[in-house]
Amino acid sequence: MPPPPGEITRLLHAWSAGDRSVEERMFQLVLPDLRNLANALMRRERRDHTLQPTALLNEAYLKLVAARERHWENRHHFIAVAARIMRHHLIDHVRARTTVEVVPLISSRDLPPGPAGQIELAITIGRLLDELEATHPVWCSIVELKYYMGLTDQETAKALGLPLRTMQHKYSDARRWLYERLYPSSCKVKANATNS
Amino acid sequence: MQSESERNELVMELVSVGLEQSPETREIYLRSACAGDAGLFAEVEERLEWEQRMGDFLCQPVVEVLDLLDRPFEPGELVAGRFRVINEAGRGGMGVVYEAHDEKLDCRVALKTAVRGHDNRLTPETVAARKVSHPNVCKVYELHSAGTEFGEVKFLTMEFIEGETLSARIQRTGSLPPEEARDIAFQISEGLSQAHHQGVIHRDLKCSNVILTAEPDGRTRAVITDFGLASLELAGRERGGMSGLRGSLDYMAPELFSGAGPSVASDLYALGVIFHEMLTGKPPLPAEESAVSQSASTATLHRATSLHPAERRCETLPWRWRKIVARCLETDPLNRFVSMDEVIARLEAIGKRRWLLAVSAAAMLVIVGLGVIPEKPGPAVRLAVLPIAVEGEPLPAAAGLGVELADRLSGARRGFVVIPPRDALRNRVDTPEKAKKALTATHVLQTRIRNSGGQMMVEASVIETNSNLTFQELRGTYHSSEIALVAKALTATVTGAFRLRARVPMEVLAAAAYADYVQGISLLRRDDVSADEAMPFFQKAIEQDPGSACRMQA
């Protein structure tokens, strides 16, 4: 049975105001959301990933419990925080996976080919997102859900409560922002070429 | 006036269509779609240009990259100068499992890699799993390491088990037939019991960690693998906490959510979930989902299972299984079984009851020798076999003798109903009059045995309850060890009285084994608790007569 509209928001507010009595009820209501996130991950798994979606979910759940004092705006905010936690978890997982030294990407340096390059990219994007989070938290959530967790456009839009095209618009902006920071020289050259 | 978000949506709509157009038609399309709105056209064009420049930037999700990383070895590769990789055989919670050929020892092995960050857990795994030697636990050999482009990869060599996981099996065929489920449940329990006895907790027990493999004799062997998260219970490693939460959600005991460490009890919970999945094809309803439906509830999530008692989560199970599974799924670990041995005893009881059905059917015709075969209908008879009265020295086999006799006679022909001694006892029936009144019996078999000095004096009568007349009588003296002969004689008394056609005697169970056999039967029938005590008697019977049909049935 879906909760009455606004109930999660009300509970989140009460929770962050220190009312412990609503805590369990609230988690009962948001857990299906978290499960949906995990299911989106599960759907794409061919056999078993070494990274179990449920492990990711456990981790997110526990950290959300620990983050009780946070000021919650609504359930989408809650999902966004869960996505952030999952991103950090994925990056930790990636880091732990390789002994190859990861050099933060600098301008004009090409990614090494293959998985090693993808790992480097994931870690570097993670750092940039820490910066992006302050100014564009929604962009950041979209990148987390789409790029890190592999959700489809529809799933991402639904999880964050955005219209599909709006989400795509923001994702396009976010990618561009990240691309410009990763490859400033290529962007500059391109910009000059366009000007001339 | 168009709002900003409406405009953004329009832009993205045009961008997504534009990306599908060829460069030649794109501009024409966009100009017409923008209908003279130069600002819109410029924005769409710029975004299109950016999309093309960025190409597949951020298009490959990180989770997929991880997937690639999981495969440190390639088929055909010689790893650590010794193991020729044949195939990727599967994946577990910690890494990929490869089928390989050990060129040094010339045998097939499984290589289980551990991804970095997990490989620090390999050593305790080796220590833990190597301690356990049991046919239902995957054998672990050695820990090796090999260099790869991502650095050193550690891997374990272990017994290669060909087959499918229990979860794959359930996915493929749905729930398992109860008989097969019991067999697999029993094997998993045996393996787990052995591990627990050696102080090893699995920690991550689930259907995907059980492999079903076909043995040369056609039987299925269930093997528990992936003691990947197993730890030495007694080594006192740091308990639980968040980092200890590694099992899969459905299989996690409620106490693990509140920070308790893994234990025998949490393994038992996971086992209950496995049983449930085998029998219904699905794990039990998650506690929190059932709690959500009770919107007025203020109970905590961790206590939500108490809103939904374990037994209610087992409603869909075959009734024989409900109590066992519910007990495993108890929210409070203290309410679960104390040990795997208890679970095994309960599983044996399920089996015994089935076994009994098979035996009693067989016994009717075969086991003791004087079988009775169904015959054409005669007058309706309700024969109450009264409990055998023993005088003198105790005769433990007497109770079972009555039970077994009733078994053997029932169904001799249509309209011939045998009321077992248990019913007589329950209704305090000890005379023909009472049998008529309480059990509507038309006849009784009343037997008295005087047991003293190694001799049994047997007096038995078949009495008609209406007239209280004796129909047929038996009087005889037997040696105390000849209880099987007494059974035969009593059967003959009844078959003679009612002219039931007796089969040619076939001595399938040796007379010496009979006393133990019927004692087992008697215990088996009494109740669940006594049923557990019956097995030693059957085993003794088998020892006395190793070649008997009894053994085949067991």
Image: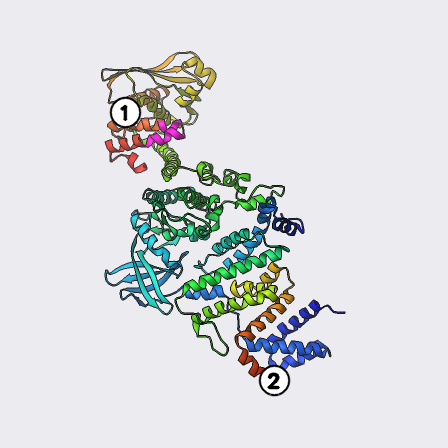
Q: Secondary structure at mark 2?
A: helix
Secondary structure of the residue carrying numbered label 1? helix
Q: Residue at x 56, y 78 (%)?
A: B53
**Residue A11, x across and y down, in percent:** 63, 49
Label 2 environment density (alpha carbons within 10 Å; few <14, some 14–19, many ≥20): few
The image shows residue B15 at horizontal and vertical percentages of 63, 74
Cβ–Cβ under 8 Å for marks 1 and 2: no
Quadrant of res B264:
top left
In the picture of the structure, the residue carrying the numbered disc 2 is: A194
Query: Is residue B202 depicted above or below B441 in this figure?
Result: below
Nearer to me, B503 or B315: B315
The span from disc 1 to disc 2 (Cα, nearest Å) is 106 Å
Where residue B417 sits in the image (x, y, percent)? 42, 24
On screen, residue A154 versus residue B500, left or right, reads right
Q: Nearer the viewer, residue A83 or A44?
A: A83
Q: What segment is highlighted magenta in the picture?
A: B523-535
- Position of the N terminus of chain B, as image quadrant, is bottom right
Residue A16: assigned label: none
Which chain letter matches label 2?
A: A
Q: For the residue marked with disc 2, what is the amino acid?
A: Thr
Q: Nearer the viewer, residue B502 or B537?
A: B537
